Image: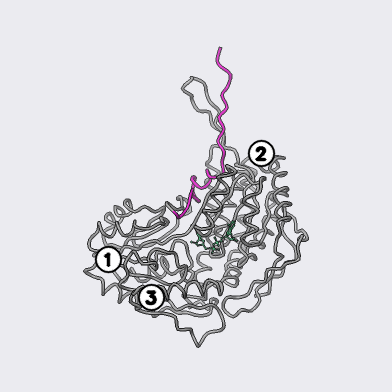
Amino acid sequence: MHVHVYDKLFIGGQWCAPSGTDVIEVRSPYDLKPVGSVPQATNADVDAAVSAARSAFDSGVWSQMPAADRIAALERLLGLLTARSDELADLQTAEMGAPTSFSRAVYGPAPVGVLAATIATAKSTEWEERRPGISGLDIVVRREPVGVVGAIVPWNSPLFSLMGKLAPALAAGCSVVAKPSPETPLDANVFAELTVEAGIPEGVISVLPGGRDLGRHLVGHPGIDKVAFTGSTAAGREIAATCGQHLKRVSLELGGKSAAIILDDADLDLVTPGLKFGSLANSGQACIAQTRILAPRSRYDEVVDAIGTMMAGLVVGDPFDPATEVGPLVSQRQQERVKSYIQVGIDEGARLVTGGLDPYSDKPAGWFVRPTLFADVDNSMRIAREEIFGPVLVVIPYEDEADAVRIANDSDYGLAGSVWTSDAERGIDIGRRIRTGTFGVNHYLMDFNAPFGGMKASGLGREMGPEGLSEYFEYKSITPPPTA
Ligand code: NAD
């Protein structure tokens, strides 16, 4: 793969000279070789992008374009994105080390799927309806774009998180200033090129790579009407507070500590491959990861053995090798963080079944952590309560079904979860009792026609489906004159 070097920033649909001189270098988390570089955006670049977005929005060039024309532009974008999907998957693997088996299956196709689903939803949206009022008058109810959107995304699912915001924002008629993470700025730049080819008007989209302080400036900018954020709960709280002060609209997709409940009638031959995806996808760096495995006391040893064997057998290595199941973590900072949690688990008295802190001696200099399983874990331990964001799972015993539901719900988070059972109805019934935004029976799947998001500290609002599109609307009611 060639090294992607950008010397310009995408501001208001044009490649512009950056106002600062700092450069963000992206290096492979596997062997630390250069992957690419982008200029680091400054607050002045944010000001220029917001100003372009504001002018575009207020001019109506996109915000008041007939919905059918906007949708036609998004369909052109869909075609271009589909054609580049494998390349974008590979770029994300290069940037952050996601195993290619996962990025080719998810990080390439999922943004395409989100855009396609959003287009379908937009096509069936009534942008303006006449609703019989209790006054006897027909009220004109309109869905109007919320305005200029600041979209801030993390490194762990960069293009998918971006598309979860850009697709509905653009469909609704908003302008967007996007801020990718400094770890993964390259895929967003390739995407930006496609928006020009698709004919999205100037001003409507900007992409400004930078870190936390740049994000803060964007969130606090008076020209931003809504912030759409994916990232950590800590940052989400700060962003929500700023938005509260300005009464900006805000939607937040935050962290998780989801449970996979294994019932007494579960088929463990299905559970272990299922958890490779549900708990360990992207080397465990996934918000939806089901990192608390709840096992019935009656089958506890059997479950620990099965998951321990699966994790000890995971293929850890070069993310571009199709056989690799766990790659390096994204950065040294994440490696240190995850290792510190493994130490916390040991110190808390959990039983180390497999993995641990020994470094690999047979791998390049990248940010590897051994897939690690802890047993004999109590739900009050820090390794059961805090998001670790790496290939570290815990197995917690439960007494009966009610106890399993209680433990699953005993979390500050409420993002995802799953249940494993041979009785589908029993599984769906458990799903009804779990306080999370999504839940799966015998697998975990995000369906782009269905709302995705978190309860409790996992977020605010929803992405995907009509619910996700409605996050980008303001509703307006126009009352006609009284009848004579
Ligand atoms: P992070 O919160 O540190 O950073 C996320 C993004 O926000 C980055 O672009 C960062 O530069 C920016 N940022 C950080 N602090 C900010 C602030 N105060 N104001 C404005 N912008 C700020 O998170 P991360 O470590 O990059 O990503 C991992 C986190 O994201 C995990 O907690 C994970 O669970 C969460 N996540 C959630 C979902 C979801 O859909 N619920 C999806 C993916 C990741």
**Disc 3 element:** helix
Where, quadrant-wise, is the N terminus in this rendering? bottom right
Q: Which residues are magenta?
A: 457-484
**Residue 404's spot in the image, x, y percent?**
28, 60
Q: Earlier in the sequence, mark 1 or mark 2?
A: 2
Residue 85 at x, y percent in the picture: 59, 64
Residue type pointed to by label 1: Ala
| Residues marked 1 and 2 touching at CB (< 8 Å) | no
The amino acid at mark 2 is Gln
User: Which of labels 3 and 1 is toward the front?
Assistant: 3
**Disc sitting over residue 347 in the figure:** 3
Query: Callout 1: helix, strand or loop?
Result: loop
Look at the numbered disc 2 and give the secondary structure of its residue.
Answer: loop
C-alpha distance separating marks 2 and 3 = 59 Å
Picture residue at 23% right of the left edge, 63% below the top? 399
Q: Mark number for residue 266?
A: 1
Q: How far from the left and from the top, in percent, is residue 145?
A: 60, 41
